[in-house]
Every structure is written in C-alpha cells, then in structure tokens.
Image: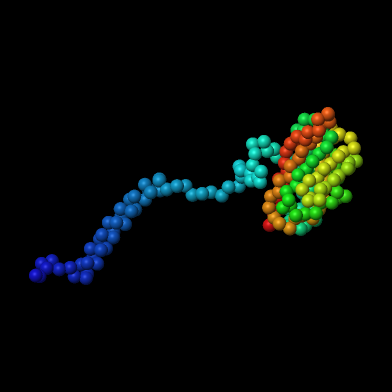
Amino acid sequence: MTDSNPIVPGRLLRRIGLAGGIATAGLLAAAPLLDSIRPAAVQAQGTPSLLEFRWENSKDYKKLYYFQSSTVPRDRAEYFLMLKPKDRKSAILKLSITVPEYFNAKIKPSRVSLCRMQLGGMLARSRCKETLPAVIEVNETQTAIEVFPEAPIPTGGTYAVVMKIFNPSNSGMFQFNALAQAPGDVPVAGYLGSWLIDIEQ
C-alpha cells in the first residue's frame, strides 16, 4: 500500500525543526518559573562555626582561655593555660590538669610553672608577670599535672600554668581538663573547665 503523504528527508527535517522550536520556546517560557523554585546558591561563610568539636561532649563543659606560641607538630612551643577570675569561685589549694593519653609530648615538671599573668590586648600579648612558688608533679603516664602552690591561688587576678614543650607529632584536638581543690576540711576537687588545644596538620 502506497502512503498518500510520504515524508521526504527535507520535510522530515522541517518537522523536527518546528517541533524543536516549539519545545525550546516552551522551556524559555518556563525559565522564570524554574528560577523561582530553584534553591539559592550556597554562599561562602566567613563567620566562625557555631559548633565546636569536643572529645568529651557534656552539658557541663566550660571552655577556658589559653594561647600557645606554635600549633605546628613537633615544634617548640610555650603554652599558657589560663584561669581568669570568672573561672573560679574560691581560692585554689591544689590544681590538677588531666592530659589526653594520645597527646604524645614529653611534659617535664622542670618546664612547667605557675604564673600570675598580665593580660594583653590588641597591641600587646599576655605575659607572665610573676612566677609563683609551687611544686609541680607529672605522673609517669604523662596524663596528669599536679600543681601545689605555696600559697592558695586567690580568686582575683588571672593565673596560668605555663608549659614549655615540643608539640606532639600527631595533629588534632586535645582536651585538657582543670580540676581545683579549695581550702577546707574536705579534699574534693571540682571541675573548673577545659582547654581545647589544637595542633594543625
């Protein structure tokens, strides 16, 4: 049977072109609608993160201020683990600092001291104003630092445990916890807060 309306190649191309033109026109007409429902492009954030990663996640966690002279692995560094007046409610008879076991840096008691600090600002860095007499002990596993000041640390002023060490070889975050024993009959150490130390890659 013979087709009464055969489609020759030229006519077929014109039909395809016409159909393509109609489809293209339809997409162009729908473009404003698509733009209105398309999700907004993600913009780069220049603000600090609202979340802070911690190894020990607890509602009772309190962040303490510190600074260190270097965050490079295996680099010589000086750490200032600070205690400001707002960080304590009573005098401190004994200060204990827990150190994560994966913080593989050698802490020597002779390189640890207790200082009364002078806080810096925009133009000057904080510095040790006076080194206070204290007995410093570090346990064999390097997971605890015990500080026994000759006189109790008063509630006023800013104090710091200063460490001069070589940074650990492994990068990451290391949570140091501060526990303080107040003068009194009951030798109970209370949690003061934590320093979250960061060693970069």
Q: Position of residue 66 (x, y in %)?
A: 75, 44
Whether residue 48 is visible to the viewer of this picture, yes or no, is no
Is 57 left, or right, of 29 in this rendering? right
197, 107: nearer the viewer: 107
Q: Quadrant of residue 169?
A: bottom right
Task: Return the residue found at the far left.
Answer: 1
Q: Report if residue 36 is visible in the image.
A: yes
Counting from the top left corner in percent of width and height, residue 69 is at 78, 51
16 relative to 47 in the view: left or right: left
> Residue 64, position in %: x, y?
73, 40
- Quadrant of the image occupied by residue 76: bottom right
Does residue 106 lie above or below 36 as drawn? below
Q: Is residue 154 above or below residue 128?
A: above
Q: Percent from the top left, x then y, of residue 170?
A: 71, 57
Is 135 on the left-hand or right-hand side of 75? right
Placement of the N terminus among the 4 image quadrants: bottom left
Q: Residue furthest top?
A: 185
Which residue appears at 75% of the width and 54% of the height? 104
Q: Nearer the viewer, residue 125 or 178?
A: 178
Q: Residue at x 81, y 51 (%)?
A: 140
- Tell me what residue is drawn at x 22 percent, y 69 percent: 10
